[in-house]
């Protein structure tokens, strides 16, 4: 994706103000995710509080993807869910991503959800997410059960409570090495400069 297009879009929209239970319990999933994160050392840890239906969050997803390509193991990017009430499909999107994580495909689902934001944001989101699950070779029936489970909802809402606790009011919000960034960088160059300030 063209960086200039991403940056231009970013400046225009900096912020957006009966199923079976899975066999894996929420506490086990949270522990598994925490262990995965702890195994990835980095000088700079970027937590991105994000709403899948927020256009600015999609723009920042692609900026951070480029940042990771440029900085490699020096940085780690952790996704945090913060679905906003004005976005009717944001929460199910977050649950879909977490359901994919149970099958080891979080990153692929995360990418597809952001890429298809305009399509599923218009409706029929669950069916579209099930199509994504099939395309990345998940067990689709398990995925659909997990996506609509109370356990996945608790994971998403736990992330949201973390955001509320730090005074988060809009998405995307970045927290770098534990410090909440009050004003998002308006371009990729500004984002790089911000990260460099934490690497010095």
Image: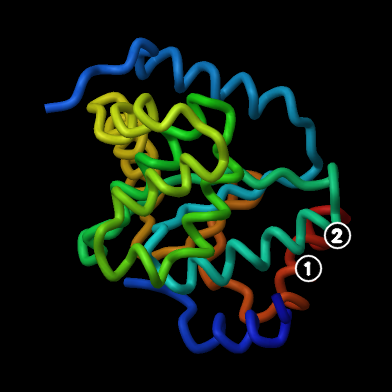
Q: Quadrant of residue 159?
A: top left
Which secondary structure lies at badge 1? Answer: helix
x%, y% of residue 47?
57, 48
**Residue beneath the point at 43% across and 66% down:** 117
Which secondary structure lies at badge 2? Answer: helix
Q: Which mark is residue 55?
A: none
Q: Nearer the viewer, residue 169 or 89?
A: 89
Label 1–label 2 contact, CB within 8 A? yes
Q: Which mark is residue 192?
A: 1
Q: Residues within 10 Å of mark 1 (few under 14, many from 20)?
A: some
| 51 relative position to 68: left or right | left
Which quarter of the figure is the N terminus placed in?
bottom right
**Residue beneath the point at 64% across and 65% down:** 62
Q: CA distance from mark 1 to mark 2?
A: 9 Å
Residue underneath mark 2: 70
**Residue beneath the point at 36% across and 19% down:** 26
């Amino acid at each position: 994706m063209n960086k200039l297009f991403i940056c231009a879009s970013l400046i225009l929209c900096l912020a957006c103000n009966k199923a079976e239970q899975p066999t894996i319990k929420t506490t086990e999933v949270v522990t598994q995710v925490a262990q995965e994160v702890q195994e990835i050392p980095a000088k700079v840890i970027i937590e991105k509080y994000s709403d899948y239906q927020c256009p600015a969050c999609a723009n920042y997803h692609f900026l951070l993807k480029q940042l990771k390509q440029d900085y490699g193991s020096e940085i780690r990017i952790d996704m945090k869910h913060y679905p906003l009430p004005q976005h009717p499909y944001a929460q199910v999107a977050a649950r879909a991503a977490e359901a994919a994580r149970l099958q080891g495909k979080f990153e692929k689902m995360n990418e597809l959800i952001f890429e298809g934001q305009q399509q599923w944001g218009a409706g029929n989101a669950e069916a579209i997410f099930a199509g994504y699950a099939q395309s990345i070779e998940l067990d689709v029936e398990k995925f659909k059960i997990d996506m609509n489970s109370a356990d996945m909802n608790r994971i998403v809402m736990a992330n949201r409570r973390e955001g509320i606790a730090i005074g988060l009011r809009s998405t995307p919000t970045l927290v770098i090495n534990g410090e909440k960034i009050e004003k998002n960088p308006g371009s990729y160059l500004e984002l790089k400069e911000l990260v460099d300030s934490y690497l010095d």
